[in-house]
Amino acid sequence: MNRQVVAFLSLFSLVLVLSVYYVISPGQQENSIVSTTPENVENVSQETYYFSSLALARNERHQEIIDEQVALIASNDSTPSKVVEAKEAMQKEEEIMLLEEALEEVVMQCNFAASYVEILDTYYNILAYRPNMKADDELLAVDTIFQTTDQYLQENEITWIYGLSPVVEFRY
């Protein structure tokens, strides 16, 4: 009986996350295009789909971790301390998911057509795309990204991420 409940909850939560993603995703893609000329419309579309697929894969990994914690909580063999640890792990994973999406929006405010943020154990990766960006503009873009993300983190009092090293990559 417990396996059926866990399986149902896992599938239901995955469907829910994917549904929300697909409902929200098209609006974000339309607003994220910086400038579209006939030459770069195809590139922008390909890049935004690439970034969307990265985000979808990242969200699926997060959901798998949450599902594992749900299974642990639902298990008859779980001790109260393991249940507490599982709930804390789920909360941390949800916090990471929200911060990744928020940082993507912050990077988009820096005049990028698409962005992707992934927070890992020792660093967080920021991948950004701007059509027709030149290699000479990278230093200024990195500075702008660092300033806007630091401002967001300070305003929202998110201090735990300061222990992680940022890595910025560009696609152009």
Image (cartoon, rainbow, N blue to C red):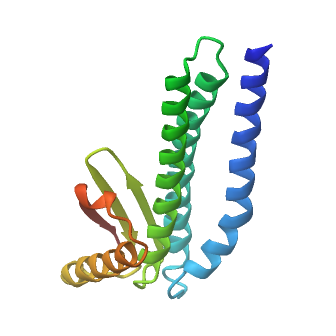
- Percent across and percent down for residue 142 are 25, 76
- Percent across and percent down for residue 75 are 64, 17
Identify which residue, 100 or 2, lies in the foreground.
2
Q: What is the quadrant of residue 10 in the picture?
A: top right
| Residue at the spot 22% in from the left edge and 84% down from the top edge | 140
Q: Is residue 134 left or right of residue 9?
A: left
| Residue at the spot 55% in from the left edge and 17% down from the top edge | 79
Q: Is residue 108 left or right of residue 87?
A: left
Identify which residue, 41 or 12, lies in the foreground.
12
Q: Farthest residue in the front direction?
A: 80
Instruction: Give the quadrant of the C terminus.
Output: bottom left
Instruction: Give the quadrant of the N terminus.
Output: top right
Q: What is the quadrant of residue 164 in the picture?
A: bottom left
- Percent across and percent down for residue 37 are 53, 88
- Percent across and percent down for residue 112 are 43, 79
The number of numbered discs placed on residues in the rendered structure image is 0
Position above or below: 52 against 64: below
Identify which residue, 158 or 138, lies in the foreground.
158
| Residue at the spot 38% in from the left edge and 65% down from the top edge | 158
| Residue at the spot 23% in from the left edge and 81% down from the top edge | 143
Q: What is the quadrant of residue 129 in the picture?
A: bottom left
